[in-house]
């Protein structure tokens, strides 16, 4: 039997500008505060959730992301997933910090099989190189990776 899971949307800000984003109109909304996210985690744990997915917008651009992950680990969540565009994983040191904080499952979004297609869909030149390098880092670090692709006509 799988663990009960909670998805926590941390905010809508993002460093991509995907052509298909259904939440783009929410980017200007204020993100949840660190304390609001901690309260969400407390409530989820009380409701027997032992798995958490942090999602957004883009969670890795939050300055408090390591604090949030550490709090989830200290709160005894077994699975701590980061749903992400994975651009920040280009930096292996950042991957290490996330893992040390407690993240143990990663769901990067790859939207094309070539740089040209992925970067076109995300409207972020260089994003494909960043994510594929990041995937290599996570693989080399022995992390669990779950693919996440939005299927649209071009891909």
Image (spheres, rainbow, N blue to C red):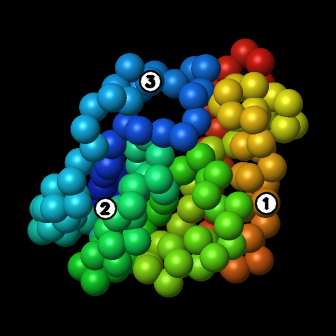
Q: Secondary structure at mark 1?
A: helix
Q: CA distance from mark 2 to mark 1?
A: 32 Å
Q: Earlier in the sequence, mark 2 or mark 3?
A: 2
Q: Secondary structure at mark 3?
A: helix
Against 116, is 74 above or below? Answer: below
- Per the image, the residue denoted by label 3 is 24
The quadrant holding residue 119 is top right
Check whether the beta carbons of the residues at disc 1 and disc 3 lie within 8 A of each other: no
Asked whether residue 8 appears in the rendered view, the answer is: yes
Q: CA distance from mark 1 to mark 3?
A: 26 Å
User: Residue 131 location, x and y as percent?
Assistant: 72, 52
Q: In the image, is 140 to the left or to the right of 2?
A: right
**Label drawn at residue 4:** 2
Q: Nearer the viewer, residue 111 or 33?
A: 33
Q: CA distance from mark 2 to mark 3?
A: 29 Å
Q: Nearer the viewer, residue 123 or 44?
A: 123
Question: Which residue occupies 40% across, 71% down?
Answer: 66
Asked whether residue 47 appears in the rendered view, the answer is: no
Check whether the beta carbons of the residues at disc 2 and disc 1 lie within 8 A of each other: no
Q: Quadrant of the N terminus?
A: bottom left
């Amino acid at each position: 039997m799988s663990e009960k899971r909670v998805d926590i949307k941390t905010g809508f800000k993002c460093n991509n500008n995907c052509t298909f984003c259904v939440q783009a109109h929410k980017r200007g909304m204020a993100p949840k505060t660190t304390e609001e996210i901690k309260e969400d985690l407390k409530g989820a744990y009380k409701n027997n959730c032992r798995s958490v997915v942090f999602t957004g917008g883009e969670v890795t651009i939050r300055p408090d992301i390591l604090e949030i992950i550490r709090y989830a680990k200290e709160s005894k969540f077994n699975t701590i997933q980061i749903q992400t565009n994975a651009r920040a994983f280009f930096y292996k040191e950042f991957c290490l910090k996330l893992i040390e904080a407690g993240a143990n499952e990663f769901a990067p979004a790859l939207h094309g099989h070539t740089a040209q297609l992925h970067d076109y869909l995300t409207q972020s030149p260089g994003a494909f190189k960043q994510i594929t390098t990041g995937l290599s880092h996570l693989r080399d670090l022995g992390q669990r990776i779950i693919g996440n692709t939005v299927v649209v006509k071009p891909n």
